[in-house]
Amino acid sequence: MPPHPRRIRELPNGDQPRERLRDVGPAALSDAELLAILLRVGLPGTNVLQLAQQLLSEHGGLPGLLRADYHELCGRRGLGTAKAATLKAALEIGRRLLIAGIDERTQIRSPADVASLLLLEMGHQEQEMLRAVLLDTKNRVQQIATVYIGSVNSAQVRVGEVFRDAVRRNSAAIIVAHNHPSGDPTPSPDDILVTRQIVDAGRLLDIEVLDHLVIGRGRYTSMREHGLAGLSR
């Protein structure tokens, strides 16, 4: 008879994630320990903590699990529909909390300030997404508006949509940001063309376009810092 899957409670006392969470708090736990709590049980010959470590290794950490297809996870030995659903739900809750936690009175002083708001969430999207960070006269964030999801190019993006929420909020300025699912934040010629169109439209509306950030995986490019598309440093 094959060995039965080892549950969390069957791990040695010092290795039990639930007890460690109780004693030292969730922030002290590793990614694998947190996943193990969600998974609850491992495989014959593989305890739940080892299974969690394997999943992180296979997908490149939590960001990879966030991007992983639900059906792909369901087919992975040791998961199945219930565990896959638990993982995807927990990761989505974390993503939504990240968005909800953005302080809409944050003052923007540099491209890094914008990146700190958007990089983690937008850097792991599988589709291109265009967002506008709306700012008041003191460069405080009024709103982060999702303008467009899909290919960000001059043929697809309607420049007027970029300013729709800014006009409603009477914003003084905006910062545009979009992601490259490839992970490379190098602006393309079409990115530069779209940005020129947005800058020109902003002048007509008396809404200053301060920057356009191209977001990759863990890094970004500020067009203003590079003097691109009419955005001076």
Image (cartoon, rainbow, N blue to C red):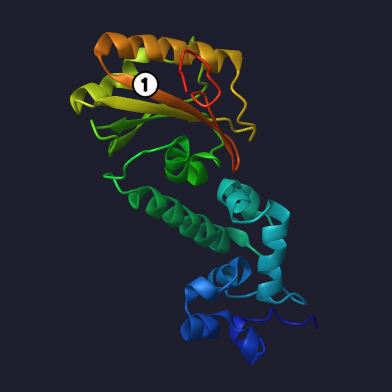
> Is 164 placed left or right of 90 in the picture?
left
Residue at the image position 46 percent from the left and 45 percent from the top: 116
* Count of marks, rendered view: 1
Residue 232 screen position, x and y as percent: 46, 18
> Is 97 placed left or right of 183 in the picture?
left
In the picture shown, does residue 205 fall above or below 226? Answer: above
Q: Give the camera-side residue of 206 and 42.
A: 206
Q: Is residue 126 visible?
A: yes
Question: Which corner quadrant of the image does residue 207 belong to?
Answer: top left
Residue at the image position 74 percent from the left and 74 percent from the top: 46
In the picture shown, does residue 142 fall above or below 59? Answer: above
Q: Is residue 156 visible?
A: no
Residue at the outermost front position: 233
Mark 1: secondary structure:
strand
Name the residue that disc number 1 marks: 209
In the picture shown, does residue 87 fall above or below 199? Answer: below
Residue 197 screen position, x and y as percent: 42, 10
Q: Give the camera-side residue of 53 and 177.
A: 177
Residue at the image position 67 percent from the left and 89 percent from the top: 12
Question: Which corner quadrant of the image does residue 47 belong to?
Answer: bottom right
